[in-house]
């Protein structure tokens, strides 16, 4: 009898599509943008997706199709170095390469793009070293207009960017860098715990029984100590799957495949 954990159309008129997990926003937005085109409605459609969610194949399928249709679609990539756990893999390293280039693509009020050195960023805490040539840009390579990375907490600048980009057509990606939990100190200091939090009462908060994932994680370590064939795979859920200790004890047998 509580709120749905994900968008649910039967719960709110503002939930424009139903979903059970991440990485679906660009697909949904693309469908809406193409429907608007056939209705001759110039309404702007904006899809917002995190850097962790962007690691799923569905997101790339949608970007590929958006370019094929030259869809009028804005994609906001909210980059905070996090999925539920820390972001991993080649895409995270690619974002680091874009960051390390030391410049960003800005836009004039008329919608014209230009490149300039980026300022001293307040939220520069990139956790990855670049594995690719910093001159590369995946989004531009597949046909998106790319802008950023912008300070995602600078609201006035973002208003300027969105107003300017309304003057452009086709698929556009706005890369913003943010701090997960910004403005709420407990979430800033423990981003994994506060990715989502359930209801706690005063008694339960003092002494909680082990969660299922805790029991599973301990079992996994016990079994791995006896059987070298045991490997563990998680989709960006090391903590949620209770695998933190396993990953520490058996790093060569632990695979975080990101949000697959």
Image: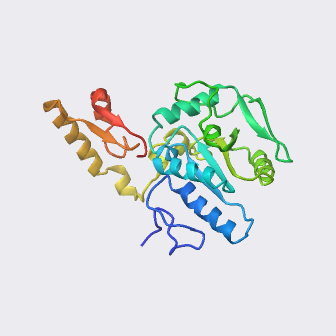
Q: Position of residue 48 (x, y in %)?
A: 60, 53
Q: Is residue 23 left or right of residue 252?
A: right
Using the rendered view, name the quadrant where residue 219 is placed: top left
Q: Residue at x 27, y 38 (%)?
A: 232
> Which image quadrant is residue 103 in?
top right
Residue 56, position as x, y percentages in the image: 46, 47
Name the spot of residue 236 as percent of width and height, x first.
41, 42
The quadrant of the rendering that contains the N terminus is bottom left
User: Which residue occupies the foreground of this view, 95 or 180?
Assistant: 95
Q: Residue furthest left?
A: 226
At horizontal 62% and vertical 40% (from top left) the residue drawn is 139
Q: Residue furthest front?
A: 68
Residue 16 lies in quadrant: bottom right
Q: Nearer the viewer, residue 241 or 33?
A: 33
The residue lying furthest to the right in this view is 110
Classify residue 153 as left or right of residue 254.
Answer: right
Residue, x 13% and y 31% (percent of image)? 226
Q: How is the image coloured?
A: rainbow
Q: Please name whichever residue, 42 or 103, is drawn nearer the observer in this view of the structure.
A: 42
Q: Where is 257 relative to 61, above or below?
A: above
Q: Nearer the viewer, residue 145 or 250?
A: 145
Point out residue 244 in the picture as x, y percentages from the top left corner: 33, 36
Left or right: 104, with 136 as reference point: right
Report the number of numbered marks: 0
């Amino acid at each position: 009898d509580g709120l749905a954990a994900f968008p649910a159309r039967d719960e709110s008129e503002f939930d424009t599509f139903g979903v059970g997990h991440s990485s679906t926003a660009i697909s949904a937005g693309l469908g809406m943008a193409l429907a608007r085109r056939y209705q001759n409605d110039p309404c702007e459609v904006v899809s917002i997706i995190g850097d962790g969610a962007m690691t799923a194949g569905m997101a790339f399928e949608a970007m590929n199709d958006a370019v094929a249709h030259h869809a009028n679609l804005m994609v906001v990539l909210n980059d905070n170095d996090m999925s539920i756990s820390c972001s991993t893999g080649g895409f995270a390293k690619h974002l680091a390469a874009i960051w390390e280039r030391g410049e960003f693509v800005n836009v004039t009020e008329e919608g014209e793009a230009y490149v300039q050195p980026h300022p001293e960023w307040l939220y520069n805490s990139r956790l990855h070293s670049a594995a690719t040539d910093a001159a590369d840009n995946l989004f531009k390579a597949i046909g998106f207009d790319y802008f950023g990375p912008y300070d995602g907490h600078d609201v006035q600048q973002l208003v300027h960017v969105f107003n300017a980009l309304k003057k452009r057509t086709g698929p556009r990606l706005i890369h913003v860098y943010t701090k997960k939990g910004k403005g709420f100190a407990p979430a800033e200091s423990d981003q994994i715990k506060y990715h989502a939090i359930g209801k706690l009462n005063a008694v339960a908060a003092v002494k909680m029984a082990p969660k299922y994932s805790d029991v599973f994680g301990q079992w996994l370590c016990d079994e791995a100590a006896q059987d070298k064939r045991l490997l563990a795979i998680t989709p960006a859920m090391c903590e949620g799957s209770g695998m933190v200790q396993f990953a520490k004890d058996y790093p060569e047998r632990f695979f975080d495949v990101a949000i697959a």
